[in-house]
Image (cartoon, rainbow, N blue to C red):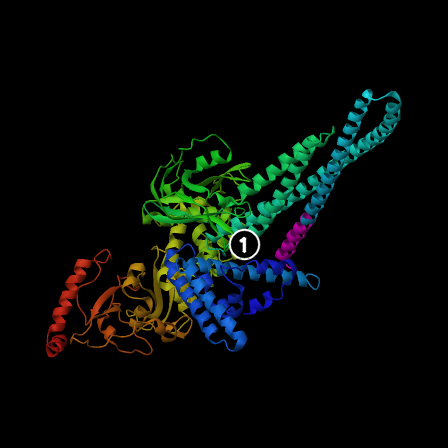
Amino acid sequence: MALWIQAQQLQGDALLQMQSLYGQHFPIEVRHYLAQWLEAQPWDAIDLENQQDEFKAKGLLDGLIQELQRKAEHQMGEDGFLLKIKLGHYATQLKSSYDPCPLELVRCVKHILYTEQRLVQEASNASSSGSGPVDGTSQKYQQINQTFEELRVMTQDTENDLRKLQHSQEYFIIQYQESLRIQAQLSSLASLPPAERVQRESGLQSRKSTLEGWLTREANTLQKYRQELAEKHQSTLALLRKQQTVIIDDELIQWKRRQQLAGNGGPSEGGLDILQAWCEKLADMIWQNRQQIRRVEHLTQQLPIPGPTEELLTELNATVTDIISALVTSTFIIEKQPPQVLKTQTKFSATVRLLVGGKLNVHMNPPQVKATIISEQQAKALLKNENTRKSDSSGEILNNNCVMEYHQTTGTLSAHFRTMSLKRIKRSDRRGAESVTEEKFTVLFESQFSVGGNELVFHVKTLSLPVVVIVHGSQDNNATATVLWDNAFSEPGRVPFVVPDKVLWPQLCEALNMKYKSEVQSERGLSEDTLVFLAQKAFSSSSNNPEDFCNMTITWSQFNRESLPGRNFTFWQWLDGVIELMKKHLKSHWNDGAILGFLNKQQAQDMLMSKPNGTFLLRFSDSEIGGITIAWVAENPNKAGERMVWNLMPFTTKDFSIRSLADRISDLNHLLFLYPNQPKEEVFSRYCTPPNSKAVGDGYVKPEIKQVVKVEFSSPNPEPSPGNSFMEHAASPTVNQHHNFTIYPSMNDSMLDAEGEFDLEETMDMARQVEEFLRQPMETQWSGQQS
């Protein structure tokens, strides 16, 4: 409700803008009486492009109707009676309007709340500008708004001058016609008697002479007016072009850059409402000036007066057409990018938007947009305006045509491609060591429409961010590497899709940290120690000093083309495996700080040897993609009095799909304290699976999977449990055995084959054996165990 209270304090133009948000589509009374409820709802949690969110939108619509009806029922007294009727009418009206498409209600309310917030913020910035420092963004916005005010005054000034010129010219024409009438009278005097002719001729000649002198002076004045008006239009157009450069070449380009970084997990690029409002103001003022210049041209044709004005008007006409063409073509943008890793035969979506479509009434004849996938070379040729055949494409996209729709509640004109699918792709010849996952394509969106009653026809096109096409999920990690590098290090205005082959290590660190935090959905990113660990891995270095890596450069080949020393995977493939593991199974543990992760075996040993037996930590495997291992300190079973660090064979996503990390740690009773000294129950118990009851309704005992390690350890506080009975001595001083998954009570059959793969047939055999075992009388089971 705080926002509505602030919105009611708006004044002047801001108040008018706020009031214009409301109408039959959403009455202002609904905003007023349901202010608190409206501002408390999760409107931003609904994705307008996701049809699956329509159910959530329907819930909000139903809630809105119920709140209105409840508010109406509570109205009392004479005034309350009228309000009760009005609110009940609004409830019926909104249900009728939005029940067929509840997402439109969400779009409407989001637009209202966002615009109110912007207007309140702008008013707040304006009021505080004189009393304290203003941040850079606020100063920039103030400058843009001040320039718009200056342009408004200039445009109004030329409008006033144009009216003055028009009136002067109309009067000039009247007087000119009067001079022609006098001339006609003089010509008709020949038929009069001489005396009368002389008398009348003298008066007419005097009037003619006076009028011709006035016409000569007035013609010079009109020429001067025209010249001054043309010069004023020159100044206005120069300022319009400058303002357009700030908005299109600075603000819109920055928005596109934020959109690109958002593809790497950066902050959201933000809404387009402010940019659209600016672009619409530009379009409005450009069009007004264009119409003024055309009216001056018409006046000039109506009354030709020799002079430089005609040439100047031709120049002005060309300039204003150029400005509006640049505005229209630059504001045809991709609001929602297609996925940058694009798998064939898979549905995908995208949204394109024309920021000035509503202002220029393009929706009166809705244009159609076509999507085509083209190669990097074709994109280069397109930007160079080289001739390319319309049939040229690098693949076939299904459902690639869409009509632009105008949303009256938000004033947006956009085309939503919801069910596109890449049927096939045509690859080009690859260069050198380049793989298919390094080849970049782009989706080209094209449309054509006219404005001003077909006065101007525009053919607009825009390119998506680079996409990498894959045909199998196994190519995803390498394709993601190509996209990440391109998004992070491309320069605005580049030739498609050139990126540097090498970058400074700190630049890559920033991109990796952004990607990691986004994928794991955590504020806990990559620490300085972690980045040193990654640098050691990337550069095969042993240095522990972060400054040693500050000026080092890493190449694309080092990042994801060359395998790490002694491994069969690249630096990125290893890190991507970690990210996938964390994202799917270990997100909560990472956020809790339970996983140190980025340590090598020697670092883990140095850290654990100073801690009591049973202390353990979790680190990512150096040798296996997407693996995490448990390292712990315990007695050496082969040498009394000696302590050593043990490392369990890494767990992967497959393992955690069978039994979670928390459950596995709970199973292993020799693990006591998470490094440095936290009892493991404090950290992991809330994530453990609740124990099953010993018997279910049909009399069966439910089997249970347990984690065991076939090595016996002594610990300061051994707690016997069923799991300990399966621990056996191992000859190796380091635990590097396959982890065993057994059914409790113990069975000899493993759920994994010799390669560690999950075997469904063997698992079903095991299940049948367990079922037969559990069907035996309880006495037989336990006697068999004791024997």
Residue 665 lies in quadrant: bottom left
Residue 125 vs residue 711, the one in the foreground: 125
Residue 556 lies in quadrant: top left
Q: Residue 345 in the image: x percent, y percent?
A: 32, 45
Rendered residue at 85%/21% (across/down): 193
Rendered residue at 17%/60% (across/down): 762
**Above or below for 681 versus 298:** below
Give the main secondary structure of the magenta stretch: helix
**Above or below for 742 versus 514:** below
Q: Is residue 348 left or right of residue 312?
A: left
Q: Residue furthest front?
A: 193
The secondary structure type at the circle numbered 1 is helix
The part of the chain drawn in magenta is 134-151
Residue 322 vs residue 762, the one in the foreground: 322
Say if residue 61 shows up in the picture. yes
Residue 547 vs residue 588, the one in the foreground: 588
Mark 1 nearby-residue class (10 Å; few <14, some 14–19, many ≥20): some
Say if residue 613 shows up in the picture. no
Residue 273 vs residue 760, the one in the foreground: 273
Q: Residue 555 in the image: x percent, y percent?
A: 47, 45
**Above or below for 440 versus 4:** above
Rendered residue at 51%/71% (across/down): 83
Residue 388 lies in quadrant: top left
- Residue to which mark 1 is pinned: 273
Quarter of the figure that contains the N terminus: bottom right
Give the residue type at disc 1. Asp
Q: Is residue 227 left or right of residue 728?
A: right
